Amino acid sequence: METMYPPLKYGLCTTINSANHLRDFSSPAYDFCANCGVTMTTEYVPTNNAEAIRKETGHWPMLMYRPTLTWSDGKGRSVTHTFDYGAGIGHVRGLKTSNLTVFDLDVLKAVYETGYNPQYPHEPAYTPELADVLYCLIMDSYVLDYSNFEDWAESLGYDTDSRSAEKTYRACIENALKLRQLIDIDAARVAFEDF
């Protein structure tokens, strides 16, 4: 049986932390991004109740973005799709995430509400890279390798009677079908296998 590489169980298109200083920017994934004909713009989606969410769930919510990916053949034909993308607070430069002081909580509140760290006010707190967004979408696209919801749910440890799990499954399918209009998913899976 072929090994399946499922999407992250805890959300669609979600990156938990960043290690850009350890990345090999000459990797096949970055080559793919440079040559796939896709460009990206992003919009930050503010969260006004982050601390309440943390108290309720026990963890900080994701920083949410809406990346818009556009593929163009350079001859006037193009396809554009917008996705949801979440990044963990570990991506925010200069942000402390444990043993928080009152000052740290104020910084976090500002980051969630505005997308900017007040310590570095002239640049966004985090800007998703095309490679990170494509990687998450490619992982979500493995949903297409399953014949039905039950097989997908069982493989990922979801309850097959869960409406929430089925909603995630349907969102993964929708994203995968949109992604297929933008890139060659099989080639992308190969390029991103060690990302």
Image: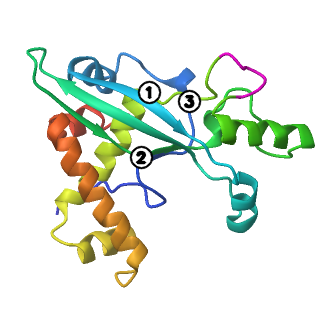
Q: Earlier in the sequence, mark 3 or mark 1?
A: 3
Please give the residue where the numbered disc 2 appears in the rendered image: 84
Count neighbours of disc 3 (C-alpha within 10 A) and say few if under 14, some if 14 to 19, many if 20 or more.
few
Residue under the image location 18 percent in, 40 percent down: 185
Whether residue 158 is visible: no
Instruction: Give the alpha-carbon distance from disc 3 to disc 2, as whole Å.
Output: 21 Å
Residue under the image location 25 percent in, 31 percent down: 191
Give the residues drawn in magenta, as a range: 117-122
Tell me the quarter of the image containing the N terminus: bottom left
Q: Which of marks 2 and 1 is nearer the N terminus?
A: 2
Check disc 3 and give the amino acid type.
Ala
Instruction: Give the alpha-carbon distance from disc 3 to disc 1, as whole Å.
Output: 12 Å
**Secondary structure type for disc 3:** loop
Q: Position of residue 27 (x, y in %)?
A: 34, 21
Please give the residue where the numbered disc 1 appears in the rendered image: 129
Residue 118 in the magenta stretch? The answer is yes
Q: Where is residue 105 in the image (x, y as percent from the top left)?
A: 83, 43
Tell me the quarter of the image containing the C terminus: top left
Residue under the image location 33 percent in, 36 percent down: 134
Q: Position of residue 165 (x, y in %)?
A: 39, 72
Is the stretch drawn in magenta largely helix, strand or loop?
loop
- Foreground disc of the pair 3, 1: 1
**Residue 124 found in image quarter:** top right
Please give the residue where the numbered disc 3 appears in the rendered image: 19
